[in-house]
Image (spheres, helix red, strand yellow):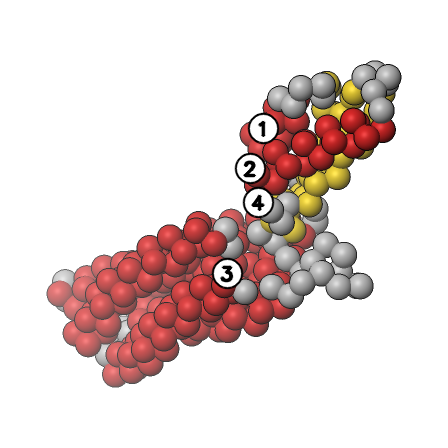
Amino acid sequence: MERNKEIYKVTLVGGAVNVILLLFKFVAGILGHSAAMVADAVHSLSDFVTDIIVLVFVHISGKPKDKSHDYGHGKYETLAMTMIGVALLAVAIGILYHGTMKIIAWTNGSKLEAPGILALWAALISIVLKEAVYHYSMIKARKLNSPAVEANAWHHRSDALSSVGTSVGIGGAIFLGQQWTVLDPVASVIVGVFIIKVAADLLRNGIGDLMEQSLPDCVEDEILQLAASIPGVADPHDLRTRRIGNHYAIELHILMDGDITLNEAHDKASEVEDVLRERYGEDTHVAVHVEPK
């Protein structure tokens, strides 16, 4: 429960910043006539929505095992990460579409209104605040080993990056004259590309875990080495791994002397389980099948 409280705390901090920024950005974008800033505001709105998703799904994932969930509810946290990726992708597509339409209109001779200085200030303030929230959230995500908080941290970083592109586009459109007003929608398109990259990474990881993707090769190699380090244990094989939320699930076979007693074999198997849980956490699911050699 302490872990969930920490996740709620970091998410609420990010949520508070998102509410302030999205209101400021919408006002600045509308009053400052900036398509890039309105796009940035929509991105901040998606940040706020994903904060709510994290709060709801982390609460569910923190529930203990029950009759219908023998492995716990950890996958809900992975589902939250995947939903954040989908939300980001949808936002990016919308930003790309509207920015591209403005660029096409400009190439056909339409005049674009130069954004106001308020929009530039909104972008600069957003960069500072969102980068600070990113670092705070990422530190907490690593400490808590939470994929949902890490996904949300990258969402904050993507918002900071989008504000960098937005500030460049708005600044160029303001200070370089009427012929450069197209820089504002160009900046919004660049923002969309950045967001798509972040969304693709989140979706790849989230869908991989939901589809029972194995742990990385370096982790599986370490598991086999740890199991083989127990005296009397030989040739760990048939390793199967996956993630369940922020925990690992590990199943493997090991060979032992066929002449030892059942109690001795059980104790050795328990040693393997203990060393793996010591390395990967007490909530790691470990199943060891003993075979005679």
The three-letter amino acid code for the residue at tag 4 is Gly
Crowd class of label 1 (few under 14; some 14 to 19; many from 20; radius 10 Å):
few
Identified by mark 1, the residue type is Glu
Q: Looking at the picture, how far across and down is residue 173, in whole percent?
A: 20, 66
Secondary structure, mark 4, is loop
| Location of mark 1 (residue) | 222
Name the one closer to the observer, 206 or 86: 206
Identify the residue at horizontal 81%, vertical 17% (top origin): 257
* Of callouts 1 and 3, the N-terminal one: 3
Residue depicted at x 17% and y 68%: 174
Residue at x 79%, y 27% (from the top left corner): 265
Which label sits on residue 281?
Answer: 4
The alpha-carbon separation of the residues under discs 1 and 4 comes to: 14 Å
Q: Looking at the picture, does residue 174 appear above or below residue 268?
A: below
Residue 86 occupies which quadrant of the picture?
Answer: bottom right
Distance from Cα at disc 1 to Cα at disc 3: 26 Å
Given the image, on which type of amino acid does mark 3 rest? Arg
Instruction: Indicate the position of residue 254 as horizontal and vertical percent values.
Output: 76, 25
Q: Is residue 50 visible?
A: no
Name which of mark 2 and mark 3 comes first in the sequence: 3
